[in-house]
């Protein structure tokens, strides 16, 4: 795999800005991810929210993994791309009735339910359709992911999941409701986590919670006493990537990540472990290709003004995220310092400040690296711009 090699001549011919996806990087990532997660009863689901570009979805579906969705639109995209319905899980704090009905019609594996209120609605809608919905309860475990505040989800102050003190009630409700089938528990503590310690902590918490839940005696729809059984444990996603080093470490540390779960979770033979990985699968295969419009001299700095803006890649503006930038047209020119900024009428439309890059000229094309996850999918039309679009490497060579 030649990482960081771009077919510059061909790429210069497309109208910028656009996303360029290197499918060799994606295929290699999938291959490593799959080989590190071969344990029996383990199931990886790709978090569609990270990137839903057609060719990407189809390649991931063909590799045999399932899909993690957070809207009816994502469930539809997953089905269209070839993910089997029985490998689709559906989370989200505010699922609409129409989305729940659609997912039930498709026969998805499981709803990750975020409140008792939602549980009642799902049971009723399933009842109206003469079916039963399989559910996992999304638990807010109050584990700190030690990542950016805006992508932390597992603290009690976050809106996600069922608070620990209501979990027993929610499990009992699952057994009492006639049209839901309780499968188990779901978690997701945050994103871009590169230190394994929060996952270790989460694993311990999960073991304890599974034991606690299985001690609950519930009353089923017919008034019989039944013991709660957890057959599915979903640990969510969150594995981070190295934004600073897309060329040296293009493949995330799947080995350490899966080893953490192998060592951390006690799994009985009748239990299934699910993962929902987004960023780690697609981030490094995507690049935002942009053209330099102007090199402008400020009072004491110079700006490289490019044709991509925060509308095309919002991560730097929204999270202060770093994306490496490379000059593809003149890679060997002497380096200079620039603030690389976009054309949007917002002061936060800045990609990187005081950044050293091979001297740029008007017309040069630049690659913003590691942009495959939460890049194209988060694009907007603010300032009435056209959406960025994309080029797939397999169509170029
Ligand atoms: N499962 C659930 C329930 C999630 O909420 C998420 C991401 C994932 C799985 C996938 O997480 P990943 O493996 O990608 O970390 N836009 C932000 C990231 C938001 C993540 C939202 N949830 C960013 O650009 O950094």
Image: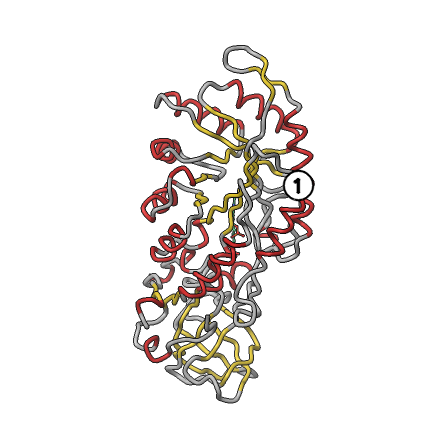
Q: Secondary structure at mark 1?
A: loop
Q: Which residue is mark 1?
A: 142
Q: Which of these two is toward me, 309 or 136?
A: 136
Q: Answer left or right for 323 relative to 56.
A: right
Q: Which of these two is toward me, 163 or 318?
A: 163
The answer to which quarter of the image holds residue 88 is top left
Is residue 159 positioned above or below 11 on the image?
A: above
The answer to which quarter of the image holds residue 101 is top left
Q: Answer left or right for 388 relative to 192.
A: left
Residue at horizontal 51 percent and vertical 33 percent from the top: 113
Give coordinates of residue 137: x percent, y percent: 55, 32
Give coordinates of residue 353: x percent, y percent: 55, 74
Is residue 239 positioned above or below 274 on the image?
A: below
Give coordinates of residue 5: x percent, y percent: 44, 76
The C terminus - image quarter: bottom left
Q: Answer left or right for 253 relative to 51.
A: right
Residue found at the very far bottom of the displayed protein: 334
């Amino acid at each position: 795999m030649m990482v960081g090699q771009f077919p510059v001549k061909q790429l210069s011919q497309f109208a910028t800005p656009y996303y360029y996806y290197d499918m060799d990087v994606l295929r290699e990532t999938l291959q490593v991810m799959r080989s590190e997660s071969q344990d029996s009863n383990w199931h990886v689901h790709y978090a569609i929210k990270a990137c839903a570009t057609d060719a990407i979805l189809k390649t991931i579906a063909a590799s045999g993994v399932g899909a993690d969705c957070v809207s009816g639109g994502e469930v539809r995209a997953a089905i269209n791309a070839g993910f089997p319905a029985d490998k689709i899980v559906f989370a989200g704090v505010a699922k609409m009735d129409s989305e729940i009905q659609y997912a039930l019609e498709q026969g998805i594996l499981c709803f990750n339910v975020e409140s008792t209120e939602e549980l009642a609605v799902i049971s009723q809608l399933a009842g109206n359709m003469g079916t039963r919905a399989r559910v996992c309860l999304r638990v807010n475990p109050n584990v700190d992911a030690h990542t950016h505040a805006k992508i932390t989800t597992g603290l009690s102050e976050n809106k996600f999941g069922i608070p620990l003190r209501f979990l027993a009630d929610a499990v009992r409700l699952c057994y009492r409701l006639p049209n839901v089938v309780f499968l188990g528990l779901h978690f997701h503590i945050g994103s871009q986590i590169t230190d394994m310690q929060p996952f270790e902590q989460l694993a311990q918490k999960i073991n304890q919670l599974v034991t606690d839940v299985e001690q609950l005696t519930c009353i089923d729809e017919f008034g019989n006493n039944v013991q709660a059984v957890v057959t599915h444990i979903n640990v969510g996603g969150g594995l981070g990537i190295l934004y600073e080093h897309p060329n040296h470490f293009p493949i995330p540390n799947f080995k350490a990540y899966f080893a953490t779960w192998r060592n951390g979770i006690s799994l009985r033979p009748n239990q299934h472990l699910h993962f929902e990985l987004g960023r780690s699968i697609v981030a490094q295969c995507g690049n935002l290709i942009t053209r330099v419009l102007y090199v402008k001299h400020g009072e004491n700095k110079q700006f490289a003004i490019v044709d991509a803006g925060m509308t095309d890649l919002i991560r730097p503006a929204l999270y202060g995220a770093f994306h490496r930038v490379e000059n593809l047209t003149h890679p060997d020119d002497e380096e200079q310092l620039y603030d690389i900024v976009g054309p949007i009428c917002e002061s936060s439309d800045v990609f990187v400040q005081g950044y050293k890059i091979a001297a740029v000229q008007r017309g040069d094309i630049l690659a913003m690296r590691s942009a495959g996850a939460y890049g194209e999918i988060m694009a907007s039309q603010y300032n009435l711009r056209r959406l960025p679009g994309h080029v797939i490497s397999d169509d170029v060579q």
